Amino acid sequence: MFEIDWENSVDRREVLNPDSFGYLSLHYIASLPKDKGYPENFLDKKFEIQIRSILQHTWAAINHDLGYKTQVDVPRSITRDLSKVAGLLEFADDQFVNIRDRVKAYGEDIKNRIANNEADDVLIDLVSLREFVQYNKDMIALVNDMAGICDARVNFVEPGIYVRQLAFLGIKTIGDLETMLSENRELALALARKSLEKPEIDTLSTNNGFRFLCRAELLNKNYPIEKIVEFINLSLDNEKRAGKHAMHLMKIYNQICEEL
């Protein structure tokens, strides 16, 4: 987007001695390009863009306060300690990048295994549940069918809140979840119809798939009302409200059974 003054730009990652720790930041001296229609009086202005990690910014701010805002030199022992902290922050930066890359690689692996029906033994966690919602064909079809009930478009929402709820139901692996989906699909859709037919809904969260599947599992496995209340309370954290929701669920279930 900008014209870069390469002669005066600095990559401090490259100029720092390999046996030293300190400020690691990428500084670009830039100006607006002359052929993009910007006002003439702005074209001769130069500005600096500084790119660094949050940890590096923290170190720079502290170092600036100690090094430039005091009237006397900083004692050597403090300067040395600052260098130690700089080393720790650089190591922490590297670790965060490593963790991010590992999470990304893990997600890619789980996505491929789910798409190829090779994920039966994958444990349920935030990453595997997210990939299941987005790449399991049966789950996608279920959510689309639910959206069709109210003619709504599907909106992806992170499913992390259901990790705990699935654990409550004893669903520990993607294979368990696939079995749960197969066994409860029809009842889950029937429950969704009772809840989604009347209200005007423009968008439907992907989490509705888990919401109705879990409730269908509770009903099909004949969980006692106390356990149903306990399950619903995992998300509400209000036992009185959870009790009302549980009674309403049982009422809808009885209506469905009578219609059959």
Image: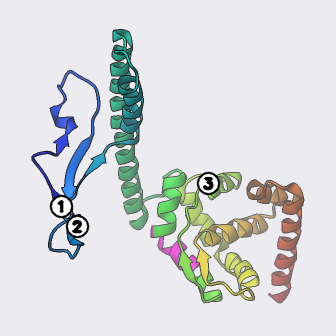
For the residues carrying marks 3 and 1, which lies nearer the camera in this image?
A: 1
- Crowding around mark 3 (Cα neighbors within 10 Å: few <14, some 14 to 19, many 20+) is some
The secondary structure type at the circle numbered 3 is helix
Q: Identify the image quadrant of the N terminus.
A: bottom left
Q: Is residue 197 above or below residue 106?
A: below
Task: Give residue 260's position: percent from left, percent from top.
Answer: 80, 87
Q: Quadrant of residue 159?
A: bottom right
Q: Say if the magenta span includes residue 140.
A: yes
What's the distance in space between the residues labelled 3 and 1, CA to CA? 56 Å
Q: Which residue is mark 3?
A: 163
Disc 3 or 1, which lies upstream in sequence? 1
Q: Three-letter amino acid code at disc 3?
A: Val
Secondary structure mostly taken by the magenta-highlighted segment of the chain? helix
Disc 2 or 3, which lies upstream in sequence? 2
Residue pictured at 53% horizontal, 59% vertical: 129
Residue pictured at 15% horizontal, 56% vertical: 4
**Contact? badges 1 and 2 (CB < 8 Å):** yes
For the residues carrying marks 2 and 3, which lies nearer the camera in this image?
A: 2
Q: Quadrant of residue 12?
A: top left
Describe residue 162's horizontal placement relative to residue 80 as left or right: right
The magenta region covers 135-144
Q: Which residue is mark 2?
A: 41
Residue pictured at 65% horizontal, 88% vertical: 150
Q: Say if the magenta span includes residue 61.
A: no
Q: Which residue is mark 1?
A: 44
Q: Three-letter amino acid code at disc 1?
A: Asp
What's the distance in space between the residues labelled 2 and 3, CA to CA? 57 Å
